[in-house]
Image (cartoon, helix red, strand yellow):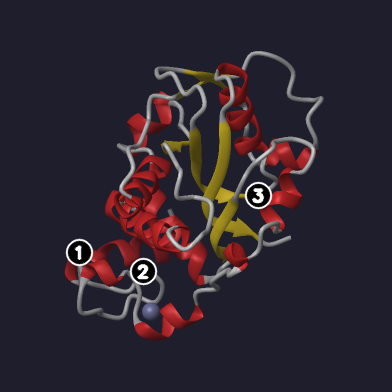
Amino acid sequence: MGITDLLRGFGSLFFPNACLNCRRPVARREALLCLPCEADLPVIDHWRLPENEIHDRLAGRLPICHGIAAYTFREGNVCQQLIHAMKYHNRPDVGRLLGERLGEILARVAGLDDLTGVVPVPIHDRRRQERGYNQAEMIAEGVARVLDRPTYPAALRRTDFRGSQTRRGKLERLENVRDSFTTGRGDFTGAHLLLVDDVMTTGATLDFCGNALLDAHTDLRLSVATLALVER
Ligand SMILES: [Zn+2]
């Protein structure tokens, strides 16, 4: 933890309603950002398109009905600060609130009205113990609340990866998919599930999770949604 993080940590003790990007006071904790930082948050409006960047990144790997991301993730931008606060500053509430924002976008997408439910990308048990929560599950809860659908956090499990990493591309290894995914509880025959994660880079995680679900359930349709899409 750097000195800046440390000072920000102290700052949040004295100013609990601080902008997650610049630390200026905000009226309500739920606002997450001050107005200027909110205006700097790069919103993606590709939800209007039937095929977009998400489809492109998953092309040939994972068949999806809809793919939506809310914000562009860039080194040092407001989106990165939100993700950082959600993952490393013990703020599961940030995940739920951002999930609700993602849900508001998804509610406008034609063709998602037949969704069965929302499946968060799992994190490893070790990681969950360190962090205290799975941020993707928090996002999924926010999404599910807005869309009025159930979440299925036990539909996928993340286990230690057994096998060679070397056959995967460099970018996929960077995305840290050292674990493998297995399906857990639930029969989703004929269902339409929304797979939810925090950040999409190459799409390797969504690829592995989505294909595990498709292999396990007959006639399953999948859509994916992430809070952030890493710019490339
Ligand atoms: Zn701000």
Q: CA distance from mark 1 to mark 2?
A: 13 Å
Labels 3 and 1: the sequence-earlier one: 1
Residue 117: quarter of image: top left
Instruction: From the top left corner, tell me how far across and down residue 153 is, in percent.
Output: 37, 30
The residue mark sitting in front, 1 or 2, is 2
Q: Are marks 3 and 1 in contact (CB under 8 Å)?
A: no
Q: Amino acid at mark 3?
A: Thr
* In this view, 71 is above or below 89: below
Where residue 23 sits, quadrant-wise, is bottom left
Q: Which label was assigned to residue 20?
A: 2
- Helix, strand or loop under label 2: loop
Q: What's the residue type where badge 2 is placed?
A: Leu
Write the residue at 41% across / 72% down: 21
Q: Residue at point 44% right, 56% down?
A: 84
Q: Which mark is residue 201?
A: 3
The label nearer to you, 3 versus 2, is 3
Q: Are marks 1 and 2 in contact (CB under 8 Å)?
A: no
* Camera-side residue of 219 and 134: 219
The dot on residue 86 is none
How far apart are the two marked residues, 3 and 2, measured between alpha carbons? 23 Å
In the rendering, at what x and y percent does residue 90 appear? 30, 49
Give the structural element (helix, strand or loop) at label 3.
loop
Q: Of the numbered discs in the image, which one, if any, rests on residue 13?
A: 1
Does residue 44 appear left or right of residue 132 in this picture?
A: right
Quarter of the image with the C terminus is: bottom right
The picture quadrant for ligand 1 comes to bottom left
Instruction: Confirm if mark 2 falls within 8 A of ligand 1.
Output: yes
**What amino acid is found at the position of numbered circle 1 in the picture?**
Leu
Give the residue displayed 60% in from the left and 32% down from the top: 210
CB under 8 Å between callouts 3 and 2?
Answer: no
Residue 89 position, x and y percent, is: 34, 53
